[in-house]
Image: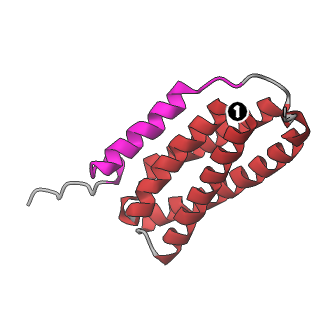
Amino acid sequence: MTLDLQKYLSLYVAEAAEHLHGFARELVRLEEAARQGAGPGAREAIDSCFRHAHSVKGMSASMGFEAIASLAHRAEDLVDVFRKDPARLDARAIDHLLAAGDRLQEMVQGAARGEPQAPDPTAMEKLAEAAKRLRAGERAASQEPPPAPPE
């Protein structure tokens, strides 16, 4: 039996756009939490970001959009670092996630137009490096407290 995925394309595009909008909205909440320290709302936003990325990954894989699924998977992996330890919230990593969300939206729109989707190695590498850095316990240099002035 052959499945005609074309008839599901508009549903995929609409649902992916909804998930990516939610992903971006929750990342903005996380950006604020990263500045103020992970508070009680951070856990909810982190879990929501994870679910949105996971949904886009699964839907994209089901539709055969492997490049989109791969990028969503890398975003999901980075959010998972925050799920395991919300104290690792990091503004630079969130910026990478926001950029990945924008790139995912572009890729979904391209898929809607029937354009082949190629992997984005730059975005993939930024997400992977951020996850690796945070798993190792490093934070972005811009978030480390400034050195105390000499006395």
Q: Residue furthest front?
A: 1
Please determine whether, in this image, residue 116 is positioned above or below residue 142: above
Few, some or many residues within 10 Å of mark 1 (<14, 14–19, 20+): many
Q: Amino acid at mark 1?
A: Phe
Label 1, secondary structure: give it. loop
Q: Does the magenta run of residues contain 74?
A: no
18 horizontally vs 50: left or right: right
Quadrant in which the N terminus is drawn: top right
Instruction: Please state the total of marks drawn on the protein image.
Output: 1
Residue 137's x, y, as percent?
27, 52
Q: Main secondary structure of the magenta part?
A: helix
Q: Residue furthest bottom?
A: 40
Q: Give residue 3's quadrant in the image.
A: top right
At 48% from the left edge and 77% from the top edge, which residue is drawn?
A: 40
Q: Give residue 12's quadrant in the image.
A: top right
At 81% from the left edge and 43% from the top edge, which residue is drawn?
A: 13
Q: Residue furthest left?
A: 151
Which residue is nearer to you in this view: 96 or 11? 11
Residue 134 visible in the current orientation = yes
Which residue is nearer to you in this view: 133 or 146? 133
Quadrant in which the C terminus is drawn: bottom left
Which residue is nearer to you in this view: 109 or 89? 109
At 32% from the left edge and 50% from the top edge, which residue is drawn?
A: 135
At 49% from the left edge and 70% from the top edge, which residue is drawn?
A: 43
Please report the bounds of the magenta region as a residue range.
117-143
Residue 87's x, y, as percent?
36, 64
Q: Which residue is mark 1?
A: 65
Residue 9's x, y, as percent?
85, 39
Please determine whether, in this image, residue 85 is positioned above or below residue 144: below
